[in-house]
Amino acid sequence: MLPLRRELIATAAPKFDVEAVQDTGSTNTDLLQRARQAQPRRPLLRAALRQTAGRGRHGRRWFASAGGALLFSLAVPMQADGARIAAATLACGIGVAESLRAAGAPITLKWPNDLLLEGRKLGGVLCELAIDDEGRRTLVVGIGINLHLDAATRDSIGQPAAALDQVVASVAQRESLIGSIATAVLETLQLYDEQGFVPLQPRFMVLFAHRDAVVDLLELGVRVASGRALGVDGEGRLLLDAAQGLRVCSSGELSLRVAG
Ligand code: ATP
């Protein structure tokens, strides 16, 4: 397995300080610890070939074989006091999806944090906020994207999954993919930090996989809402046309499923 080449990532992500390691527990955990000690002065990107403790939301596991996925985290200093993780997650998803579309993969987004390819889960975004002793805020954004899926990893995942090698021939260019995705995410996050989610809302709607679909929202496996998905509002909340009328849902603990 070729090692990750730091210089190639740095060339494609000139606005970041870049680190590349072969192994770590979780790139998000690594950057969270550091950003809690002190907000980084520049955006920081840490990529790994393999994670031994990759995480999804709510402590769920993220599975990837060594070299089988793009695994990296960004630590991005934020200015806005009110920066909300829920809408920031959507902002990051937009950056990732637009960047992968430019590389030839027809990605859509499942609210709030999944990347879909042909309706199956290709990857996800995990945002966490670090606040240092001086109250400075850093958003730590973990991104996992399948490049290839072997049978063992597919079995572990437990839901239909997809890999980028189905549609992009040059997945060997993992470093330039990481760099260009990171650059796109920095653009959407900085826009979010300066202007909130409103200017990003139309960009999300172009990518939204479930517009007009009838969906259920689950909280810890229990259905808490159902209705036709209309889209998201200017704060990134999901709008449902439900039997009781319009429902506005904040992402917190919620997972979306197509009904039936
Ligand atoms: P869901 O995807 O079930 O709607 P979620 O968006 O909350 O829920 P996350 O917590 O973001 O999911 O991610 C963890 C889940 O993602 C795991 O429970 C597993 O089903 C799935 N998963 C783990 N690894 C992969 C992978 N490499 N590719 C696709 N899906 C994965």
Image (tube, grey):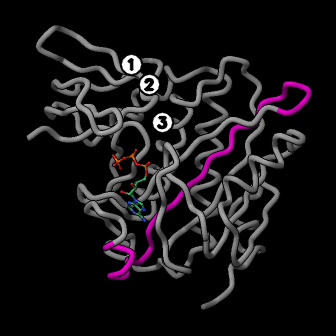
Element marked by disc 1: loop
Q: Amino acid at mark 2?
A: Gly
Contact flag, marks 3 and 2 (Cβ < 8 Å) = yes
Image quadrant assignment for residue 243: top left
Residue 18 in percent (x, y) is at: 78, 62
Q: CA distance from mark 3 to mark 1?
A: 11 Å
Element marked by disc 2: loop
Contact flag, marks 3 and 1 (Cβ < 8 Å) = no
Residue 70 in percent (x, y) is at: 55, 68
Q: Which numbered marker is on residue 253?
A: none
Q: Amino acid at mark 3?
A: Leu
Q: Is residue 118 left or right of residue 196?
A: left
For label 3, being within 8 Å of ligand 1 is answered no
Q: Which numbered marker is on residue 233?
A: 1
Image quadrant assignment for residue 53: bottom right
Instruction: Give the labeled residue for mark 3.
Output: 90
What residue sits 44% from the left and 43% below the top? 113
Instruction: Give the labeled residue for mark 2.
Output: 236
Residue 223 in percent (x, y) is at: 23, 30
> Is residue 37 placed above or below 219 in the rendered structure?
below
> Is residue 238 placed above or below 126 in the rendered structure?
above
Highlighted magenta segment, given as a residue range: 132-155
What residue sits 23% from the left and 11% below the top? 246
Q: Amino acid at mark 1?
A: Asp
Q: CA distance from mark 3 to mark 2?
A: 7 Å
